[in-house]
Image (cartoon, helix red, strand yellow):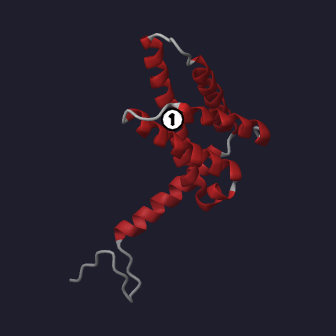
Amino acid sequence: MTYQFGFHSTDGYEPVSRNLCSQFARCLRTRLHPVVNHMVFELSITLCIVANTVVLAMEHHGASHALEAALIVANNVFMAVFTAECVIKIMALQKEYFQSGWNVFDFIIVLISYIDLASTSSGGGTRGFSVIRSMRLVGQCETGIN
């Protein structure tokens, strides 16, 4: 009996794990594609962008420590939501995701948010980059909700 671990053979045998993974990825992609194109998904993300903009506008000099802590938590929650949006869209749209300028813009904003988080948690930098996330609102208004 011969076992194959990820090798191609001439008899057309494909390892079960590779076949199972590709089937799972295809199934996931076909289920997520209608979700990312649905009006409710787009509206939810737009509402998160608006709420994130409001949270960013609440930050001010002399704010109490409780407010600052709440704003940091809210900022991290929004960052997680926008990261999840990117991941879900990339899984659903694959190469098509990077063909849209606004998706690339969103992806870059998420990356910058992580750079900003790393710089503030290490003690350096400011939270100024998080303001860039509010620029996503411009993209949502320009593309409109289908």
For disc 1, the marked residue is 79
Q: Where is residue 24 in the image (x, y as percent from the top left)?
A: 46, 58
Q: Position of residue 51 (x, y in %)?
A: 61, 24
- SS for dot 1: helix
Q: Where is residue 118 in the image (x, y as percent from the top left)?
A: 41, 39
User: 42 and 31: which one is in front?
Assistant: 42
- Residue at the bottom extreme of this rendering: 10
User: 104 and 60: which one is in front?
Assistant: 60
| Residue 53 lies in quadrant | top right
User: 20 and 58: which one is in front?
Assistant: 58
Q: Position of residue 38 (x, y in %)?
A: 68, 41
Q: Tag count in the figure? A: 1
Residue at the (28%, 78%) spot, across then down: 4
Instruction: Report the side of 24 relative to 1 (left or right).
Output: right
Instruction: Identify which amino acid the numbered label 1 is placed on.
Output: Met
Residue at the (49%, 21%) spot, across then down: 71
Residue at the (52%, 46%) spot, across then down: 111
| Residue 18 lies in quadrant | bottom left
| Residue 5 lies in quadrant | bottom left
